[in-house]
Image (cartoon, grey):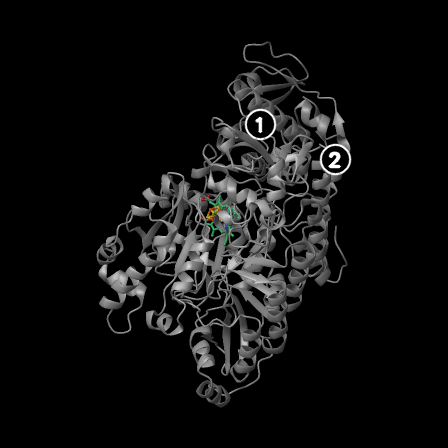
Amino acid sequence: MPLLDADGFRADPWQRIAPGEPVTGEAVLVGLAELPAVIAGRSNTQRIGVEVVNTVRLPELSPFLGQIDLVAIAFPAFADGRAFSLARQLREAGFKGAVRAVGPVIADQFTHLVACGFDEVEVPDAIAARQPEDQWRAALASYGATYQTGYGAGASILERRRALRAGQGTAS
Amino acid sequence: MAPAKQKILLPAILLANDLLDGDVIFWATRGWSVDPAEATVARDEAEAAVLQTVATAALSRGEVVDAYLVDVTLRDDGLPVPNHFRERFKIAGPSIRQDLGKQAAFAHLRGRA
Amino acid sequence: MYRYDQFDEAFVRERVAQFRGQVARRIDGSLTEDEFKPLRLKNGVYLQLHAYMLRIAIPYGTLSSAQLRQLALIGERYDRGYGHFTTRQNLQFNWPKLRDIPDILDLLADVGMHCIQTSGNCIRNTTADHFSGAAADEVEDPRATAELIRQWSTMHPEFDYLPRKFKIAVTGAPRDRAAIRAHDIGIQVVRHPVSGEVGYRLFVGGGLGRTPMIGKLVRDFLPKAHLLAYLQSLMRVYNLEGRRDNKYKARVKILVHEIGIEEFRGRVEAEFAALDPAAIAADPEEVARIEAYFAPPAFVKLPETSQRLAADRARYAAFDRWVETNTFPHRQPGYTAVTVSLKPVGGVPGDATSDQMRTVADLADAHSFGEIRVSHHQNLILPHVRQDELYALWTGLVGAGLAEANAGLITDIIACPGLDYCALATARSIPIAQAISRRFASPERQREIGELGIKISGCINACGHHHVGHIGILGLEKSGQESYQVTLGGDATENAAIGQLLGPGITATEVPDAIERLVAVYLARRQDGETFAEAVRRLGIEPFKAGFLAAPAESAHAAA
Ligand code: HEM
Ligand code: SF4
């Protein structure tokens, strides 16, 4: 499935490893069940990612967060928003690697995804075909500022008001 | 509710809402019509299957929403009248405002809901 | 009242542009109907039976005269010259075309309005006591809190794809006029019994629909500064744990019911403990900025009672009746809050024409500091009227057909759109309201019966609040006919209760007689000064059940 981040579609460096397959490659994406063994047997430079369903709970992932570079969370349907909270929890727990949404998310959700801590999305071909790169880029640019503090990189509206009050002009 | 999922009783017509206007429209000889009197009436399963194909195609082309077949009884003057009161209201307009909806536009619908 | 600053303004404009783009992308095929539908719902666009419907947010039910005039204009230009005020303090237009909606949104943005989150599985328009800022019994005006929640919940990136819709209501008074325990979260502004500090009491898991439940206490006292962090924690628990396998079990009330309030509270508190409230909260200056918008208007100092009013009441009997029913005690001496009834006898509950909207806007400018409220009883309120000016106001309302003296009485009926408009309906509700209203039209009789709330829904979704009506009526389908179930004993206030079913369904034509029989039981059995609701609470439903069943219930079904 095509992979996309804030800069547009790009090649996917991660290689999915099915249970039982040899864990070779520079960047390997494995299931949660396989993860402990894969970490234990990792070669020096190998990067490891884990792919999970959206019903997984933070405590199940916490022990591994310092040792992995990617958490890919499934969206069974675009309207199933559990992964938004899970991604937030990962970020609040201090996870610094990449977070990926996997499934039929749509361009209109891109700002929310990014604000909750996702870096990239992997969408089915049909969606990539209907919603080319420019729609995802436009989606990201649709709001100058939003109300929630601590979500996304820019200053929230509350922070901007504070800055205005402090006489510093508009922060960004 | 959800008439689309039920087994289709005959005779039947195909109705939908226009994507852009929201108007209730009917599949007729020359395409979609706003007048129920022009609705193509399917009298057997083969004709109903044709209407179903039309519905699926129109939905996937995105020109209509909520397209489904409705079983009707033909009035003496040939007007197809849905058997279920929900669909009769849907076609006529609000029963409390006879000046609104299709009942206001088409004399053949007045006082019939 | 709150006014948009440059940031609110920019945000709403961006929202309009985004929706315009979404409509264009639906038309060009970028978005399928399945993708577009949740997106249009999040912006208040439904598909009803005959047309699209647009639901406009009226945050915490507060409107300015300029906003109401703009709604009147939209009604004329893009709809059929009228709008429908709802139990959610919103306004619905029943006939807009999808292609026009982006332009309508622009007109709304011109007056600081929008349709954001008036539908869809997200945090909906936050509602509040319609007498906020006027009621004498209020700890604090709840609208500053509601506005803070409005901003925080607007396009919240984490909570825009919840298991189901989520409704928050706020009251600032111990008397609950906002039905807070019928909401997913109900917030009551309270004073701490020991410290005197103002904070919040929170209820969770209320809701109507097919599984009606009364909200349960989740936090007895929450410091004001912790509100947003607490809401975030609660929403996160719901977003992660709420059921998604069955949309009828997806509301937070079901989660609370299934795991129990203790467990639910524990999970919320655990989430809350891990957060830094100060990082999420609005800073004190921001809170002060918002609160300043809800400062009382420039009241003049007046005596408690008005000589002028007394004289006018003595002179005009119809006016006197209207003052008795349609005014509400104000905290400011010499002022009162007025209910503008949208329930003329035989009319459509909650409907107002564009001309009527303009009349109310003009009267609000003349007599109520340009401010209007929408109540969840589907009426309008002029919150700050000088008692001296009531007669002038009344004559203005009479001319527009807006002076029905029935606030809180048996003809002040709440009814959802039902099968006259709604695609989900199983039966009509408006004609039932009209028939009851005609039956009990006599002002003397209405006053003799006193306070009685009839609430009607056209299907199990309960948009007409029938579960919490003193008398509730639910329209269903039975053997291909419309059929109506009648419940008794519901209550939407601080005594919140779900009504109990009185018997088998009856036909539309039997409803007015059935209501007559219930009223007769009450009139025969009431004690001094007892309202209908109080009598039901004292007597239980049995005597009423007997009255209800006194006539053949099923006969007309067979005939029809
Ligand atoms: C006309 C189109 C409407 C549709 C399609 C619609 C749909 C629904 C649905 C599906 C529910 C059930 C939600 C649940 O139990 O999870 C519901 C509940 C509700 N709706 Fe509506 N509604 C409509 C109009 C209205 C109107 C006009 C009002 C206000 C007068 C309203 C206010 C409410 C309220 C108060 C509830 C129940 C409270 C609760 O959320 O538990 N709705 N609506
Ligand atoms: S209660 Fe049912 S009929 Fe009435 S508005 Fe809600 S969904 Fe429609």
Please name the amino acid that badge 1 sits on.
Answer: Ala
Position of residue C444 relative to residue C430, above or below, is below
Chain for mark 2?
A
Q: Position of residue B52 (x, y in %)?
A: 58, 25
Q: Is residue B27 left or right of residue C197?
A: right
Distance of label 2 from label 1 (alpha carbons) = 22 Å
In the image: residue A158, left or right of residue A90? right
User: Where is mark 2, residue-wise?
Assistant: A135
Q: Amino acid at mark 2?
A: Gln
- Rendering coords of residue A140 (x, y %): 72, 40
Residue that appears at 63% across and 74% down:
C365
- Label 2 Cα crowd, 10 Å radius (few <14 / some 14-19 / many 20+): many
When asked about the image quadrant of residue C298, the answer is: bottom right
Report x, y in % for residue A162. Answer: 68, 59
Whether residue C176 is visible here, answered yes or no, is: no
Q: Tag 1's secondary structure?
A: strand
Which residue is tagged 1? A74
Residue occupying the far front of the picture? B76
| Residue in view at x 40 percent, y 60 percent | C436
